[in-house]
Amino acid sequence: MNQANMEEEIMLMKGNEAVAHAAIRCGCDGFFGYPITPQSEILETLSIEKPWETTGMVVLQAESELASINMVYGGGASGKRVMTSSSSPGVALMQEGITYMAGAEIPGLIVNVQRGGPGLGTIQPSQSDYNQATRGGGNGDYNTIVLAPATVQEMADFVDLAFTLAFQYRTPVMMLSDGAIGQMMEKVKLPAPKPRLTREQIEERYPWAASGRRGGQNPRVLTSLDLDPAVMEQHNLHLQRKYAEIEAKEVRFEELMCEDADIVIVAFGSAARICRKAMEDARQRGIRVGMLRPITLWPFPTQEIQRLSETCQRFLCVEINAGQMLYDIRQAVNGKRPVDFYGRCGGMMPTPEEVLTCLTNIKD
């Protein structure tokens, strides 16, 4: 379908497919990726849709994850909306490129559809890349904005949001999904398309971008390298000021039934979907349970958890890992309330019944 004839529409599709369709519609200039389960449908869907024929979007299967992230570096440095996607071991290979992008202040989107680890692990869903995403898996003092979708709709919505934040703050943004959301099918409202920016529009909006044109004064070189430590320190301080601004302005979360809650569950992504059912079942049993779902894992909703610690009795952290977000919750609570944990790891998913049992036990 020609982009001019595309309108907002509702479709049934997988989370991975939603990412691909949203990328085409939000004016993405290029996708560079490498197949790995459970995210391969992103590249496959783009290959089927052939956006290079309708919007001019480049779709390239690179020779490796290392090549993919460096192509994103180059495209982002030119002011283009470019992205890649992979799953946990593949994103681990991209960490050098991600820290280079953070250091050079280059925007870009990395979609991680997580699977169990460590190492090659399993192809089943997991949330065990939380630390890698939120604390920076590469070297140096840096952060990346991390968005955690919990629905197929959010898989679509967060593509454009990620690009908006990436260019607003000149930083890589990661969408941290998992194999369950990537593979499940739900109804999705796809946005009306927006055109890709022209070269002239890019040069006007992003004066920092490397245009590739020769002969101009002060050619733009975007790099994370500086041999003068005094200059590098000033650059690091600039980055820290930027991260402080992001923490002040870009915290996102969803809060459910916390007004009278004795126990507040903190969960993200697929775990939040499971916990919502457990919360509803607990309410039917007379246990006053609420839930806080972080949407940005970085910046983390620390202040909201601190506020809730003034009214609730305790917290329950539920994750599909061994307890990586638990540290951030306990740091936010600062000893004011007990923080319990329930999780499954290695690709195993908790059930609502398991979470309900945990809620019942900690209430007693």
Image: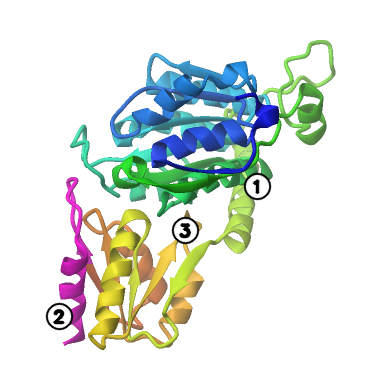
Distance between the alpha carbons at the discs numbered 2 and 1? 48 Å
Query: Where residue 316 sits in the image (x, y, percent)?
Result: 28, 72
**Which residue was labeled with disc 1?**
238
Instruction: Name the residue that disc number 2 marks.
Output: 361
Q: Counting residues from the N terminus, which is met first, the one under dot 2 or under dot 1?
A: 1
The relative height of residue 56 versus residue 286 in the rendered view (above or below) is: above
| Residue 347: percent from left, percent from top | 19, 46
The residue drawn where x is 60% and y is 16% is 53
Q: Position of residue 29 (x, y in %)?
A: 62, 26
SS state under label 2? helix
Q: Residue at x 38, y 72 (%)?
A: 291
Res 231 quadrant in image: top right
Amino acid found under the numbered disc labelled 3: Ile
Tell me the distance, in whole angstroms, between the alpha carbons under discs 3 and 1.
Answer: 26 Å
Give the class, few, some or many, for how many residues have Cα within 10 Å of label 3's Cα (few <14, many ≥20). Answer: many
**Is residue 9 depicted above or below 149 in this figure?**
above
Q: Which residues are magenta?
A: 342-364
Looking at the rendered image, the disc whose residue lies closer to the viewer, 2 or 1, is 2
Is 144 positioned to the left or the right of 56 in the image? Answer: left
Q: Residue tagged by mark 3?
A: 295
